[in-house]
Image (cartoon, helix red, strand yellow):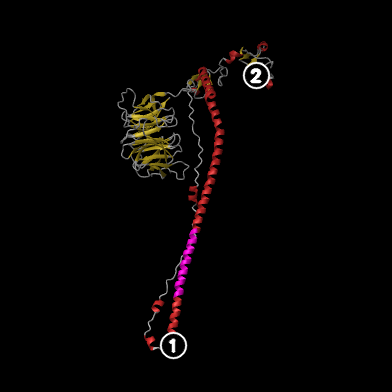
Amino acid sequence: MDPSHSAQDVVRCALCRDAVAPMYCNVCHMHLCDDCVAKHLSDKSQVHSVVSLTQYLSTLHCPKCSDHPDNQCKLYFENCDCPICLHCVTSEKHKHHDLFNLKELYQDKQEVIRNDLEELEKLVYPKYQEAATHIPVQRADGSQHWQQLRSALHKKREVLHQAIDDIIQTRQEEIGDQATRYTTAIDKQEDVINAAIKEIKQTIHKLKNLLEAGDVCLVSGYKSSNDKLRKLPPKLKVTLSNIQPLEINTQLLKEFVSLSPLSVKTEEQGLTVPSAGAEALFPARLLLSVPRLITDIPCGDQDLCNVSCLSDEEIWTCGENNILKLYDLDGVLRKSVQTKSGNMPQDIAVTRSGDLVYVDYWDSSINLVLTNDTQKQRMVKLSGKESSAKIQTLVYVGGWKPLNLCCMFSGELLVIMDSDDAKQTKVVRFSGFTPKQIIQWDDQNEPLYTSGYNTKYLSENRNLDICVADRGAGAVVVVSAAGKLRFRYTGPPSTHHGSFIPREITTDSHGNILTTDQYSNSVHIIDEDGLFLRYIDIGLQYPVGLFVDSKDNLFVAEWETGKVKKLQYYK
């Protein structure tokens, strides 16, 4: 086999370029054959380390430290994403950084690679192959379908043409009937007039004879008939028919030959591969033993109810009034908007495009405050007055009272609402203005949520579960994206905090669920399967609103103080 033209070949000696190389020099990084080892070792310019290729391949080869070239790297800093030597540990550059053993990290990484390879070969790649086989079938089905549509359209055309021909034939017959009636009426009128003319002529002749005869008896006995002849026959008044100059209703024709729109969408196939042993390169972030207060944000008003992050630097708030307020983290009021109806907003959320939505319980509506820069009407900064903003009512839910809402990862809205008579509660997923899904009953046809005048907040988790803090039930109720009950969390098995009465709820990037327990002035953290992890109870005063930003910092709105506290609870 010619090595220069071989697609796959054994390792060759770097010196003679021909013989198979079972040896390797760790110092010079060269492959060597048995015959060339002695020649290579005769080079006294440096100390060589020649080992078997098998030993080389089975040994971990750590790189040289970039800051200390004489040392090999033994450790790895996650924060800098680089290997380091032991001397680097004491440097200010890497102070407070997370440290990993490079050998252990290498072994973990190898395990990840092996599992990824197995997953790709045995699961992912076959799925793609299967998907590729569907394409020709879909193409053939589409071609057949388009031909069927064309045939159906041709038949519709024939039906339309026949209908028009039938209408024209009917109108032709109506014109013939009208012509006959018209001719008959004219003939009758002509007969009446001709008869009258004949009678008048006879009367004129008779009167002339009376005058010429001079007969006293005949003239004395004359009786006039002019009264009868003076009355003309009725005049025939005819309104001739016409073709009505109406425009063709093309919209009606389009509806007769309507064509549903083509929908081409991608649908998640839900390939989920268990990967035991293929853990993340770095372990999940650990919870702090004692959460840390980062900052207090004074928001001016007491009775603060809700908070939602516009960004990591700005927060929207609302309380028991009709004003929505935007603050920065220093507590500076940046914007303010009055609700459209003047009612107090029940809940707020920020859309993925950066606009604000709020719930108006009293007029049963969901409203959008257009605050994004792409909108034509943009809120202006405060100058002592509420700023102007365009508020659009997205949805009216007649017969129901919307309680709270959240924005989903898909961009859709989740709204929890009570019926007007407070006897039913449901969660509705809205896509635009249209309800797409209703979640209300479990598999035994029992209500998932309590009804009545109890606060119920909701949030979507990263695994697409829908989490509801049901105060009336004293539970967090979690269902899957399909609306199937997964679990109910009613507090940890044993607690000194007393009864669990949840209010607000949110989730973080690790899939953990956080909910306020306002009467114990704490926040419960549970994992996505309902396992209690810990409390956050560092001097909170009646915590109500909750939100987690993109860095997993927790914002807690306090009802009594009118403050929003920003907390760190991960290491």
Please say if 270 is above or below 33. Answer: below
Q: Residue at x 50, y 44 (%)?
A: 259
Q: Position of residue 419 (x, y in %)?
A: 33, 39
Q: What's under tag 2, amino acid-wise?
A: Asp
Left or right for 320, reference 262: left
- Pick the front one: 24 or 446: 446
Q: CB of mark 2 within 8 Å of CB of mark 1? A: no
- Which of the 4 quarters of the picture holds residue 401? top left
Left or right for 157, reference 556: right
Q: Position of residue 102 (x, y in %)?
A: 52, 18
- Pick the front one: 501 or 2: 2
Q: Position of residue 154 (x, y in %)?
A: 54, 46
- Mark nearest the camera among 2 and 1 is 1
Earlier residue among tags 2 and 1: 2
Q: Position of residue 165 (x, y in %)?
A: 52, 53
The reply to whether residue 240 is in sight is no
Residues in magenta, as a range: 173-195
Return the mark for residue 111.
Answer: none
Left or right for 55, reference 364: right
* Inter-mark Cα distance, 2 to 1: 151 Å
Quadrant occupied by the C terminus: top left
- Which of the 4 quarters of the picture holds residue 293? top left
Q: Secondary structure at mark 1?
A: helix
Please say if 484 is above or below 356. Answer: above
- Pick the front one: 179 or 295: 179
Q: Residue at x 41, y 24 (%)?
A: 287
On the image, numbered disc 2 is attached to which residue? 9
Q: What's under tag 1, amino acid-wise?
A: Glu
On the image, numbered disc 1 is attached to which residue? 212
Count of numbered badges drawn on the protein: 2
Q: Secondary structure at mark 2?
A: loop
Within-10-Å neighbours for mark 1: few <14, some 14–19, many 20+: few
